[in-house]
Amino acid sequence: MFNPVKWLPLQANGKSLSGRSDATEILAGRNNLLQLVQLRWLAVVGQLATILGVEFGLDAQLPLTEMLTLVAALSLFNLLSWLRCRTAAGDIANWELFTSLLVDVALLSALLYYSGGIANPFIFLYLLQVAVGAVLLKPRYIWVMVVLTSGCFVVLTLWHRPLILPDLVDLTLSLHYIGGLVVCFALNATLLVIFIHRIGSNLRQRDARLADLRQRAAEEEHIVRMGLLASGAAHELGTPLATLSVILGDWSHSAPLAKDPVMRDEIKLMQLQLQRCKSIVSGILMSAGEARGEAAVATTLHLFLDQLVEEWRRARPTQVLEYERSDLIDRPIISDSAIKQMIGNVLDNGIDAAPLMPLQLRVECASNWLTLSIRDAGPGFSPEILANFAKPYYSTKGRPGSGLGLFLSVNVARTLGGRIDASNMTGGGAEVVVKLPLAALTLREGNEDGF
């Protein structure tokens, strides 16, 4: 009848999804109040049928005026709750649901007072109020509900009007029996709250995991679309790059240009950058559609890192990269283009933040984890960028399409079982830490897998 997690705000990666979360909370609050209204109408019908059935069917002597007045008051309150649900402009607060349940407890206590108190078998309907409260209310309200219903249970053992039935005369309950009933009620109420709360917590954790999986699926779909676009763009760029290569070759052999040292240096720089563009395009075309580990190259950890740093320095001769891998144990690994691109993207972002300052790369290995720390001397990350770190199109560069590099790098690291964290350093600048499990990079012999 009630959804244990319906009133909870929708979450992903541990954070509320701001706009959608507010709308979800408002809708959940209204639905929960509507559920209480529907449940209360059933209670009104059931109470009315029970009172009339006991009075005329069992020939009991009930104070009909008082009890029917209480049922009418409950009906009026339920009508007001229904109007509140239909006309509410904002959120239905949790304390409103708590107040609504308090009214139910108060009217149930009054009906039990006029119909035998502890001797009335319907006294255990208090447990229904506790169960509903455990599903709908926050913990601080739930335990208040347990204390109040237990208090009402105790009070009804002392003060109540006797239930007069033809076959029940001088019905008395021993003090020990009444004490046992009170202990039984308190125990049942406590266990209900504990287990319903645990079940609700498990469901919330499951929903959080599902939301995270949906987010990852959306990101992976986005990556696939970008891969298709990149592959198509690489095909289209092949012809103009070849044309530019021919033109620059002609310029380099032109006598007027060859005599000018400035133009000669600029032509060489353009040829170097053009060659880099062609290498990038070739890499995209070669890796398009490849699965992880296909066409991977066997190498060692030291050689892989040294080559990566050398290639990066060669592509950016004017930049300074301070590289340190002291006391790093060498071991066989596989060299994958995706890993190179991931680390290269992080280095590129670091040098873009402070192009005129040295960039630091420190590599460590501990507890079966490879850690690469990249530090720059730039202004650091803004709070907005840190809050949306590695989300696509969040960048300080202010260019259309910026922010995809870190987004792709984080997804590559996550696919390998690692992660990428970003923070601002105390003395200025920013630090990005890439952590990868060595098991995902280690070269395995074929006979280990039975090949």
Image (cartoon, rainbow, N blue to C red):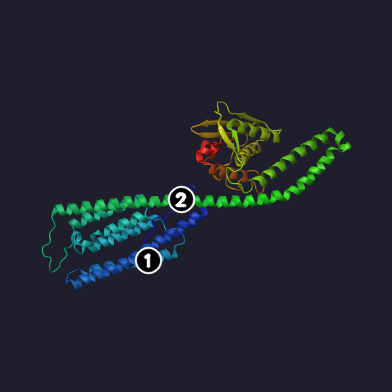
Q: Is residue 366 visible?
A: yes
Residue 128 spot, x, y in % from top left: 30, 59
Relative to 310, say whether 114 is above or below. below
Q: Nearer the viewer, residue 70 or 179?
A: 179
Q: Secondary structure at mark 2?
A: helix
| The quarter of the displayed image where residue 255 is located | top right
Tell me if mark 2 has few (under 14), some (14-19) or many (20+) residues whose alpha carbon lies within 10 angstroms of its own: some
Q: Secondary structure at mark 1?
A: helix
Point 25% across, 60% down: residue: 109
Residue 318 spot, x, y in % from top left: 71, 33
- Amino acid type at mark 1: Leu
| Discs 1, 2 touching: Cβ within 8 Å | no
As drawn, which residue projects farthest toward the bottom? 56
Tell me if mark 1 has few (under 14), some (14-19) or many (20+) residues whose alpha carbon lies within 10 angstroms of its own: few
Residue highlighted by disc 2? 208
Q: Which mark is residue 390?
A: none
Tag count: 2
Point 27% across, 58% down: residue: 126
Relative to 416, say whether 38 is above or below. below
Foreground label between 1 and 2: 2
Q: Nearer the viewer, residue 50 or 371?
A: 371
As drawn, which residue projects farthest toward the top? 327
Residue 122 spot, x, y in % from top left: 23, 62
Residue highlighted by disc 1? 80
Point 44% across, 65% down: residue: 87
Q: Earlier in the sequence, mark 1 or mark 2?
A: 1
Q: CA distance from mark 1 to mark 2?
A: 35 Å
- Amino acid type at mark 2: Ala
Q: Is residue 429 visible?
A: no
Point 56% across, 50% down: residue: 220
| The quarter of the displayed image where residue 47 is located | bottom left
